[in-house]
Image (cartoon, rainbow, N blue to C red):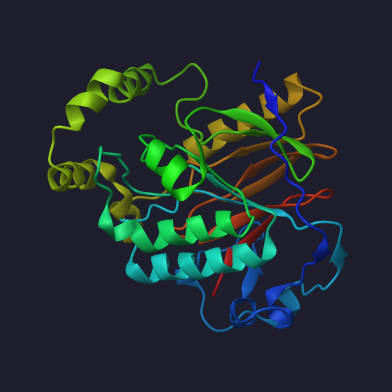
Amino acid sequence: MLAESDAGGAGKGGTWLHPAVAAATPVQAAATIRRIRPGDRPPAARKGAVPRSRLGLASAVMPSKPVFLVSDVHLGAVPPETEAAFRRWLLYVKESASRLVVNGDLFDFWFEYGSVIPGEHVRVLALLAELVEAGVPVLVMGGNHDWWGGDFLRKRIGVEFRQDPVRLRLAGRSVLLAHGDGLGTGDLGYRALRLVLRGRATRRLFRWVHPDVGAWVARIVSGTRDHLDGEVKPSPERGEFLARWAASRLAEDPGLEIVALGHSHAPVVEETAPGRYYVNSGDWVVHRSYAVISESGAPDLREWRG
């Protein structure tokens, strides 16, 4: 049983406005947010502006700011315009969220050498540090592409970095958080490979590889770029397995309210029982999606269009 950590999800009280209301900050006013609904097509398949009737505008006063959940951004593999949009989204998070959770694969590849970090991620890392300094805690979960984080992220950037599933409270609700790879008892070949790749000996040996060579190897084996041009589609079997796994965890533990996963690149909010939800925040390879968890009500899936 995973121990429950009272990490705190409730932020300071205040008014949380939908950015389309254009009443808060320049970042919010310039952004357009679209709520994701079942059967929606990815941004590349849509044209024109989002009708105002579908934006779900609201300016209700909330008892606290919500928690924002994102996953599978795959920085380093996505186009520069996607990374720029993600940076604008982080500025919006700074104004609108009580807490940010990155549920794995923020980077398409991340490995911490003793004194070297990938230069292409400096601007995003600086924004994450800015969120922390502004009083917005950031939790980063290691995914199958960026599990090899450590002291740089924790001590220099100030984020909380975890490498294993964790149960904690977000916005006052009991949440089981995991990226989604290696769950269950199947796929023994991948599980064995994962143990080798994440082993201490492997990490020590990899530190002797020049960072440029290591990044080149990572690009070859990643496969993320195949999703960008549509050659490879997200595996429906993977998404179905994760949904079943989440439903089983919720059924086994009556005190658990939400199971939040990533990895499948398919945004989903599914109510498995009254008031209990499986949430998958999707990805930024195709959808630019994220989830919003508030103190009550169903988690909300949204798509960033800013």
Residue plotted at (73% across, 72% down): 18
Residue plotted at (24% across, 19% down): 201
Please, is residue 286 above or below residue 277 in the view?
A: below
Residue plotted at (51% across, 27% down): 164
What x and y, as percent, mark residue 262?
A: 53, 42
What x and y, as percent, mark residue 106?
A: 43, 49
Give the side of residue 190 with respect to residue 297, left or right: left
Q: Is residue 105 visible?
A: no
Please, is residue 300 above or below residue 167 in the view?
A: below
What x and y, as percent, mark residue 88?
A: 51, 70
Q: Is residue 245 visible?
A: yes
What x and y, as percent, mark residue 172?
A: 80, 41
Q: Quadrant of the N terminus?
A: top right
Q: Nearer the viewer, residue 183 or 30?
A: 30
What number of labels is visible?
0
Quarter where residue 228 is shown: bottom left
Please, is residue 79 above or below residue 197 in the view?
A: below
Give the side of residue 188 with respect to residue 69, left or right: left
Please, is residue 297 above or below residue 275 in the view?
A: below
Give the side of residue 123 with respect to residue 281, left or right: left
Quarter where residue 188 is shown: top left
Q: Nearer the viewer, residue 58 or 186?
A: 58
Q: Quadrant of the C terminus?
A: bottom right
